[in-house]
Image (tube, rainbow, N blue to C red):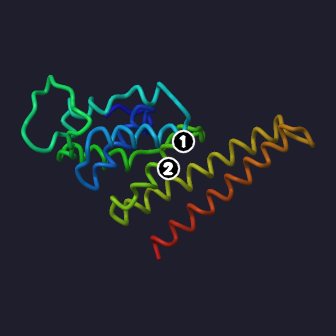
Amino acid sequence: MPKFRDHSLIPAEAVRLAALGQLAAGPRPYGDLAIEVRRFASRMLGPSLDILGTSIELLRHEGLIKPVGPPTSPSHSLRAETAVELTPAGREALHELLTSRVRSPMSDLTRMVVALKLRFLDLLAPAEQRAQFEMLVELATAELARLADLRNQDGQGESALGDWLNQEITQTEERRAWYQRRLDAIAG
């Protein structure tokens, strides 16, 4: 599965995570799956050809999903009403996506990946859930250091940039505290 050098997810993997995670609950019609993935991605990022350009059909070609019922030719496209389900390789790929690192700094795409990981977190064992929250605490801590450094260099005083950076820092501190509370609840 393609990843950045630091083993974090590349943008196209967000669609894979969304689709495979949806199918973890059981088979569903291909058309419904495509609509749900598009809806989630659009609400998180707005319309994005970079993200939505990745075809769910590719998941079938890669052997991660398969039609339920009578076999279809690999050359035929899936119909909207055709139910699809995860294959064993699809379950393995989903697990790999759920346990992959999240890339810093926090961007809209990173927020979408975090949201998808949180949405499907219950598919992981408790130890893996803890590892994900540890990673998110670490990510928020790195983000805080980056924002504080930027504020110290360019956002001093009562400038609009300084005010905005203070707001970003406050939100990131709150996010880190929430991750830590979730981690403590799993560990406790």
Q: Residue at x 28, y 49 (%)?
A: 23
Rendered location of residue 127, percent (x, y) = 37, 64
Helix, strand or loop for disc 2: helix
Residue type indicated by callout 1: Met
* Residue extending furthest toward the front: 81
* Residue at far right of view: 158
Q: Quadrant of residue 5?
A: top left
Residue contact at pointers 2 and 1, CB within 8 angstroms? yes
Nearer-the-camera pick, 121 or 71: 71
State which quadrant residue 55 falls in. Answer: top left
Residue occupying image coordinates x 27% and y 30%: 57
User: Which quadrant of the view contains residue 129?
Assistant: bottom left
Q: Position of residue 59 (x, y in %)?
A: 26, 34
Which mark, residue 44?
A: 1
Image depth: mark 2 or mark 1 in front: 1
Farthest left residue? 70
Reading the image, the residue beneath label 2 is: 115
Residue 12, image x and y in percent? 41, 31
